Image (cartoon, rainbow, N blue to C red):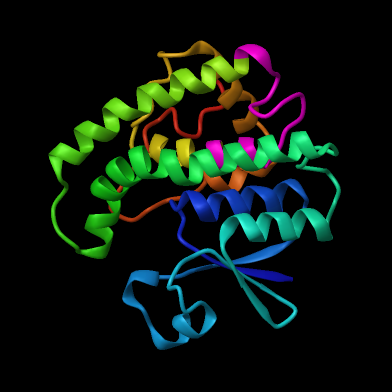
Amino acid sequence: MYRLYHVPLSPFCRKVRLTLAEKRIEVELVEERYWEGSSEFLKRNPAAKVPILRVDGRNLPESSAICEYLEETHPEPPLMPQSAVGRYEVRRLVGWFDDKFHTEVTSKLLYERINKKIQNSGYPDSGRIKEGSKAIRFHLDYMAWLLEQRRWLAGDMLTLADFAAAAHLSALDYRSDVDWNRQQGVKDWYAKIKSRPAFRSILADQVPGFTPPPHYADLDF
């Protein structure tokens, strides 16, 4: 069995969890308080980041590298297209969400409202929260534009790009930070991906001190 060192609301960890679940790979989940920087944790990943996937005695860090490793070692069901152009588009969008979306939205909403309290690292910055609330509108509109042309974000098949986006949005939705009424196409896409068996453990997450809204785990939200 694989072991995943993770944090429940980390979008990077959620992306890996979704990939593991979609490929029906059994995994032991171990919560890691990475911000404490224990010596044992730093031995697993000197970069002091989660997720870390423990496989055959090896510690594999970095979420995108982990997902592509799983794609290569467990090719069914595929989460990457066969064409080079298709794979490029998936990687481009994974980068979009894990870099641009994360910087402009996730770090300013989720991290300010939840991570700071959990890590006891200060009070939420209202200015950053306002910036994140404004920026997410642009990203939802961009997703809607993509979905007007495609069945899924990167094309006609479910890919790692969808899991990257859903990982960030699901973490934000835990605190009702997504306006699902802004773009019906995005809401329909999320309802479709949220209904997959791979999403069940994500929707069951509970973070002490924070209660998700009623619609969080509702498949017909």
Side (left or right) of 158 relative to 153: right
Q: Is residue 154 one of those drawn in magenta?
A: yes
Q: Is residue 158 one of those drawn in magenta?
A: yes
Q: Position of residue 37 (x, y in %)?
A: 36, 78
* Screen quadrant of the N terminus: bottom right
| Quadrant in the rendering for residue 196 | top right
Q: Residue at x 32, y 29 (%)?
A: 135
Whether residue 143 is visible: yes
Q: Position of residue 102 (x, y in %)?
A: 41, 44
Q: Is residue 140 above or below residue 34?
A: above
Name the residue nearer the viewer: 2 or 214.
2
Q: Residue at x 36, y 28 (%)?
A: 136
Report the label total.
Answer: 0
Q: Residue at x 56, y 63 (%)?
A: 62
Q: Position of residue 56 (x, y in %)?
A: 75, 79
Name the residue nearer the viewer: 209 or 30.
30
Whether residue 25 is visible: no
Side (left or right) of 104 relative to 80: left
Q: Position of residue 193 (x, y in %)?
A: 63, 31
Q: Residue at x 68, y 49 (%)?
A: 19
Q: Is residue 195 above or below residue 184?
A: below
Residue range in magenta is 148-165
